[in-house]
Image: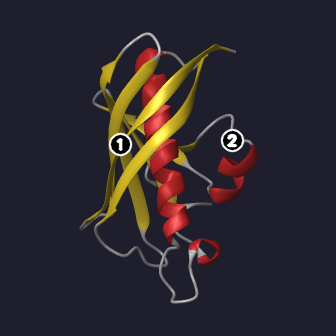
Amino acid sequence: MSKLTSLGYMQCEDMQGFSAIAGPYYEKLELGVITRALEITEQHLNPQGVVHGGVSLAMMDFVIYRAIGDELSHDKQFATIQLNTNFLAAIKLGDIVYGRGSIQRSTRSVIFAEGELYTADRSTMKGSGIWKVLGGK
């Protein structure tokens, strides 16, 4: 049993492909805001013993992508066309990384959004990007 399930988080649905390998990701709705989370295990670490940067980048992309779906519809499909990130702090084995994203602006063809990853005591990454609207499923 994951620490996250004991905190009221549920494993995200539709975890396929790379997202299933990079996770597992969890989510929780509180006060109208959905927070995603990842419990850091040894599979997420680099040779220096901290979280691999690719894990943080993948989670940021996942968090923002899912937040777009939360706001617009999970029946629509989007593709990341630009993702800008800033690494702010290292993440360690046993940490729980939380993430939230939101749309800043959208048009019929593109969405501008941002997100943040953080642990219980520090912000670890901030990001923003552009997602192309592809259509429905």
Mark 2 and mark 1 residues within 8 Å of each other at the beta carbon:
no
Q: Toward which corner of the image does residue 28 lie, by quadrant?
A: top left
Q: In the displayed structure, would residue 42 be above or below residue 7?
A: below
Q: What residue sits 50% from the left and 53% below the top?
A: 59
Q: Amino acid at mark 2?
A: Met
Q: Which residue is mark 1?
A: 100
* Depth order, front residue of 136/122: 136
Q: How many C-alpha atoms fall within 10 Å of the one at disc 2: few (<14), some, or many (≥20)?
A: some
Q: For the residue labelled by badge 2, is the local secondary structure a helix, a strand or a loop?
A: loop
Q: Which residue is mark 2?
A: 15
Question: Horizontally, is 60 left or right of 13 in the view?
Answer: left
Picture disc at residue 135: none
Q: Amino acid at mark 1?
A: Arg
Q: Toward which corner of the image does residue 124 lie, by quadrant?
A: bottom left
Residue 99 in view in this figure: yes
Q: For the residue labelled by badge 1, is the local secondary structure a helix, a strand or a loop?
A: strand
Residue 121: image location, x then y, percent? 24, 68
Residue 94: image location, x then y, percent? 48, 75
Q: How many C-alpha atoms fall within 10 Å of the one at disc 1: few (<14), some, or many (≥20)?
A: many
